[in-house]
Image: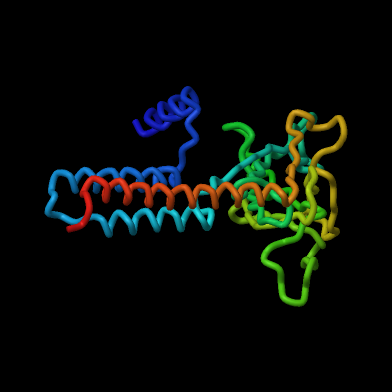
Amino acid sequence: MRNSIKIGWTYIRTFFRIDFYWKSFLELLFPLSIAGLIALQQIYPSADYKSVIVLIFLLWSMLAMIGFFIPIVKNRAMILIPGEKKTGPPNDPGIPVIIKWSAKGAFIASKPIRICAKIVNLQANVESKNEFKKCYKEFSIAFFNSVQLPLKKGRYCEGDDYDAGGVTINMDKLRGSSSIYFSSPGAYLPVMIYKYVDDDNMRMDPLFKEKENLMFHQAIVVSPPEVYLDIRNQQITYSLTIVVTLLALMQFVLSIQGPVQ
């Protein structure tokens, strides 16, 4: 039943192109609450909701000013990494890894980007997760030209295993997450840094090669810092619009009540 409701809601969002998430719901509560209080004020003239309405307007404006309602943009890619190097069957498609990255508003240079990765089973009857554990002792996905967050004091741009931001797969949970940032705009492809179970040598290979994995080819496209200024200007305009709406509403209420005797 729950899956049917979820699928139905997905179809509705797709048909009407609704971009709705929990912050959108909270954002919608502010005007609905104000409208409800104004309606109650008309029904019960003796009640005074003016101060509550002003507080809601100011809270709404403050959250808009700090960028609370800026949506989280997401992207994802699936890659296939080599399976068991000695016992793998011929034409083995590999072990699938899902990489997700997300950021506030856009993927912008010098702003944090959240990276998540997890190992998944290719098919119901193919235990890709077990194959991954048998094959790899350590496994990381790195984005060169990026920096790991948070920065360690006295170790700027210096990692434990490599000088790049990335995510390390937890060998028990078969997933991992971290935050990185890029200092300059561009399109960046990841590399994998790993150790085999029976080999202590650290290896490094590109996850995407020319004419290979083309259907899974996906890079992080990082925008220039100027994009952040556009987003901030939009949020400031949004916040000021709320304040202007509050002032206009107060002026309208005063005009209805007439001059104070």
Lateral position of residue 50 relative to residue 165, left or right: left
The answer to whether residue 82 is seen in the rendering is yes
The answer to whether residue 102 is seen in the rendering is no
Taking the view exactly as shown, the residue that stands out farthest to the bottom is: 154
Q: Residue 226 placed where, x, y %?
A: 72, 49
Residue 93 to residue 40: above or below: above
For the C terminus, the quadrant is bottom left
Of the pair 196 and 156, the residue shown nearer to us? 156
Q: Residue 24 placed where, x, y %?
A: 44, 43
For the N terminus, the quadrant is top left
Residue 89 to residue 185: above or below: above
Q: Residue 26 placed where, x, y %?
A: 39, 48
At x 83% / y 44%, what residue is drawn? 206
Lateral position of residue 104 relative to residue 184, left or right: left
> In the rendered view, how is the structure colored?
rainbow
Q: Residue 3 placed where, x, y %?
A: 40, 32
At x 41% / y 32%, what residue is drawn? 6
Q: In which quarter of the view is residue 182 placed?
A: bottom right
Of the pair 214 and 186, the residue shown nearer to us? 186
